[in-house]
Amino acid sequence: MSKFTDKTVIITGGGSGIGRAMSFLFAKNGANVHLVDLDVESANQVVEQINREGGIAQAHSCDVSDQDQVVALLNDFDRVDILINNAGISHIGRADNTSQSDFDRVYQVNVKGVYNMLYACLPIMKKQKGAVIINMASIAAHVGLTDRFAYSMSKGAIAAMTLSVARDYIDYNIRCNSISPARVRTPFVDGFIANNYAGQEEQMFKKLSDSQPIKRMAQPEEIAALALYLASEEASFITGTDYPIDGGFITLNN
Ligand code: NAD
């Protein structure tokens, strides 16, 4: 696959889980990686390891849900070759027991955070006449999952924003695709099992693993490998598409 030398890559939520694995993989392939994270300490730890291994990376403390912070951050960039909108939060609940504040919180990070990054990056991408955007959606954008009302709302919005952006900026040579994983073993999954199923962690882990026909969760590195391909020159004919990476969850669960 083509190298990413001299490519400026922004990865939101780069300090943990899937974003962390993407940060390592893009850096290993020569990119200049910018991790944008609310938890800058975790992002800094990733950066230190990348730098120790000879890669180029920087961490930026930023809440993607705050447009002023995002715009101020992007003021310092004159190129953005690849934007990966990966930061996201989870939520468990149904329409009649999701509080207004929880619904708003999920919307602010998972939906508005993506809009804020697009809003600030697209003018730069238009000027340079070419870029790749990858948005992290989820199987929740495609199938009805139990107890995931607000989260599904946010991931459905990602799928729709991906199509809209792919359509609007195609003449600027900007490609936009989304990735829809099923369960991936990250602190995001471990955290929600711990918070929502205290005392039944092991059973829940097995239940969630078994809900994929392939009978395991994905590793973050598997999602990162798909993102690397979608960002590469080899994927230059791919835009406006969602890529499930789900161990058969969407098509084989019968
Ligand atoms: P994670 O919790 O391990 O990491 C998320 C990162 O985002 C953290 O570093 C966190 O600090 C950062 N973040 C959260 N809110 C932020 C904000 N407002 N501003 C900036 N950074 C913020 O999560 P993960 O499992 O690696 O998930 C990454 C993405 O993949 C999310 O969008 C998630 O919805 C999606 N996804 C995950 C799974 C899964 O099973 N893990 C499945 C499908 C989709």
Image (cartoon, rainbow, N blue to C red):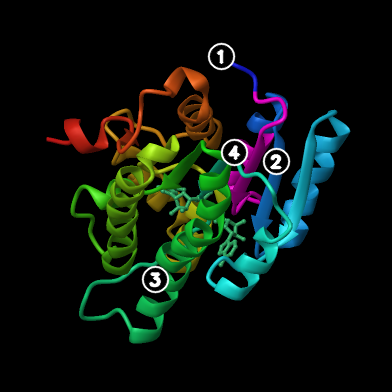
Which of marks 3 and 1 precedes in the sequence? 1
Which of marks 2 and 4 precedes in the sequence? 2
Label 1 sits on residue? 1
Which residue appears at 49% of the width and 33% of the height? 227
Please state the horizontal and vertical placement of residue 63, each as a whole percent of the image: 61, 68
| Mark 2 to mark 3 CA distance (whole Å) | 26 Å
Name the foreground residue: 3 vs 209.
3
Comparing labels 1 and 4, the label whose residue is closer to the camera: 4
Label 2 sits on residue? 33
Residue type of the residue flagged with mark 2: Val
Comparing labels 2 and 3, the label whose residue is closer to the camera: 2
Residue type of the residue flagged with mark 1: Met
Please state the horizontal and vertical placement of residue 173, each as a whole percent of the image: 44, 35
Residue 216 visible? The answer is: yes
Q: Which residues are magenta?
A: 4-24
Discs 4, 3 touching: Cβ within 8 Å: no
Label 4 sits on residue? 81
Name the foreground residue: 175 vs 248.
175
| Mark 4 to mark 2 CA distance (whole Å) | 10 Å
Q: Residue furthest top?
A: 1
Comparing labels 1 and 3, the label whose residue is closer to the camera: 1
Q: Mark 2: is the Cβ under 8 angstroms from ligand 1?
A: no
In the rendering, which numbered label is found on residue 78? none
In the rendering, which numbered label is found on residue 107? 3
Discs 1, 4 touching: Cβ within 8 Å: no
| Mark 2 to mark 1 CA distance (whole Å) | 18 Å
Please state the horizontal and vertical placement of residue 72, each as a whole percent of the image: 68, 68
Which residue appears at 70% of the width and 52% of the height? 77
